[in-house]
Amino acid sequence: MKHYIIPIFVPHMGCPFQCVFCDQRKISGTRHADPVEIINSYLETINKKKFKKKVEVAFYGGSFTAIEKKRQIELLSLVQPYIMSGRVDNIRISTRPDFISIEVLDYLKKYGVSVIELGVQSLDDKVLELSGRGHDSSCVYEGAKLIKEAEISLGIQLMPGLPGDTLDTILATTKKTIYIKPDFVRIYPTVVIQNTFLHELLKRKKYFPLKLSDAVNICAKMYREFINNRIQVIRMGLQATDLLEQEYVVQGPYHPSFGEMVLNEVAYDLMANQLSIVDCSCGHVQFIVPYRQLSIYLGQKSINLKRLRGMVPIDVNIVGSRDLPKNQFQISTENRLIKCFQKYIR
């Protein structure tokens, strides 16, 4: 069942570290908001019948389990009447892997937490050190193990492009994440936020963020690996907000449609692989794709179609069909119809 998520931002609450990339207040766009007020204002308007989905309260933007326990309980308790009445189904939290323990998981379950997202960022120890994370990769494995043993859904957030990252370290982190077997991942390519230490490194020319095109290609590789191993990718790229676009992103692969750009690249690779084995004597090739995904296959400003037409000396087209389900596309030539199953495009 799809979720209706009520996001509650607790920017930087609880975290004892200042990672080089971090200013959660700016990223969440809520520098002065009181979580208690937000929770009450959101929850009082919930009408579950209207949503026809699972309703989930999600605490984002900070290290929830690093907050003083009394404060955690206060925030979780605000949601309890809505869980008891059935208007809210469960709670999701975001936290650091080094603030997970059996004791913590016991009381989180008691208060209805059923999903925990770990801000892992990287599983390369050198990258973690250079990023000021304050822990190594071993506590990620241990924290993930405890969460899974507690039968709580596990999410992992990754940040390709951190200081010290290379294509090899990023792909190695991807494979190590697959080994952990989370229920889902988020991929946030590293961007430079104003007045962070990463911003200072950039000014000193000691850090260079990924170019947008490189970040798209790298995340497409990560996406394919996760999907091939049945791990859902629920988001790619930071949430688009006026604050991010107008004030705070200094440099780096930020784009309001970043996730779509990655899917465009994945779709192009699928079609290009098939086109490379088509007999060019046929004179015409047409890709028939699910109508709802037509824009993904075409790419922004039909760039994928232009790239495909540049590959072969024949006419190439992409059309949508309302009869095709997701995860399936067809290739039509002058002589025959070729059905191709694909599993990359969500």
Image (cartoon, rainbow, N blue to C red):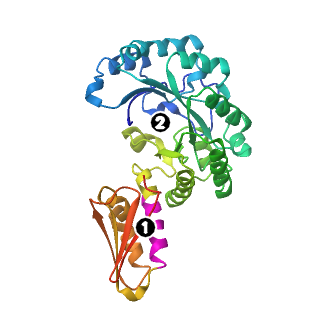
102 up-or-down from 182: above or below: above
Q: Is disc 1 surrounded by few (<14), some (14 to 19) or many (20+) residues within 10 Å?
A: some
**Quadrant of the image occupied by residue 65:** top right
Report x, y in % for residue 113.
51, 23
Report x, y in % for residue 303.
38, 68
Label 1 residue SS: strand
94 up-or-down from 78: above or below: below
Look at 54% across and 15% down and name the residue there: 110
Q: Which amino acid, mark 1?
A: Cys
109 to the left or right of 177: left
Q: Nearer the viewer, residue 171 or 147?
A: 147
Would residue 206 be seen by someone viewing this image from the given angle?
Answer: no
Name the residue carrying label 2.
27
Report x, y in % for residue 115.
52, 29
265 in the magenta segment: yes
Look at 68% across and 37% down and name the residue there: 132
Would residue 310 be seen by someone viewing this image from the given angle?
Answer: yes
Bounds of the magenta span? 264-277
> Disc number at residue 330?
none
Q: Nearer the viewer, mark 1 or mark 2?
A: 1
Name the residue carrying label 1.
340
